[in-house]
Image (cartoon, rainbow, N blue to C red):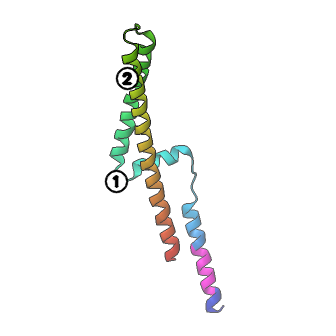
């Protein structure tokens, strides 16, 4: 076996090992759990907590809006829209953090692949 064939064989083995490392069951739950794996996992937990609180607030404001007297409908309608927008912004922030972690993981895999 000459050196070219040995180099090709080693590269194929390393590529196979990297492919096995990268191949994971990419379900939505696994993707969302990735946000907790970073150094700022506590911040993602805080974001989820805020999103839950805002969901409860949104349902409460919606209930109050539909049961309010005509004098209070405007107040509860504005509260409903503000809580809805705040919930959307919080969830978008959480998903941006998860995407950032996923992108960092992919860049590390690419770096490993380029080094080998």
Q: Which mark is first along the chain, 2 or 1?
A: 1
| Residue depicted at 44% across the width and 60% down the height | 104
Q: Which mark is residue 79?
A: 2
Does the stretch in magenta take in 72? Answer: no
- Give yes or no for residue 10 being in the magenta stretch: yes
Q: Residue 43's spot in the image, x, y percent?
A: 33, 45
Q: Main secondary structure of the magenta part?
A: helix
- Residue in the foreground of this view, choosing between 47 and 17: 47
Dot 1: element = loop
Check the picture and name the quadrant holding the N terminus: bottom right
The residue under the point 39% across, 16% down is 74
The image shows residue 70 at horizontal and vertical percentages of 41, 8
The disc at residue 39 is 1
Q: Position of residue 94 (x, y in %)?
A: 42, 43
Identify the magenta region. Answer: 6-14
Q: Quadrant of residue 78?
A: top left
């Amino acid at each position: 076996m000459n050196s070219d064939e040995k180099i090709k064989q080693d590269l194929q083995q390393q590529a196979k090992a990297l492919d096995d490392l990268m191949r994971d069951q990419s379900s939505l739950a696994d993707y969302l759990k990735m946000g907790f794996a970073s150094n700022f996992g506590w911040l993602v937990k805080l974001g989820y907590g805020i999103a839950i609180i805002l969901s409860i607030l949104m349902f409460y404001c919606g209930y109050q809006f539909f049961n309010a007297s005509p004098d209070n409908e405007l107040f509860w309608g504005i509260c409903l829209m503000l809580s809805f927008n705040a919930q959307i912004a919080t969830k978008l922030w959480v998903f941006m953090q998860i995407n950032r972690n996923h992108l960092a993981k992919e860049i590390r895999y690419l770096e490993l692949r380029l080094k080998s």
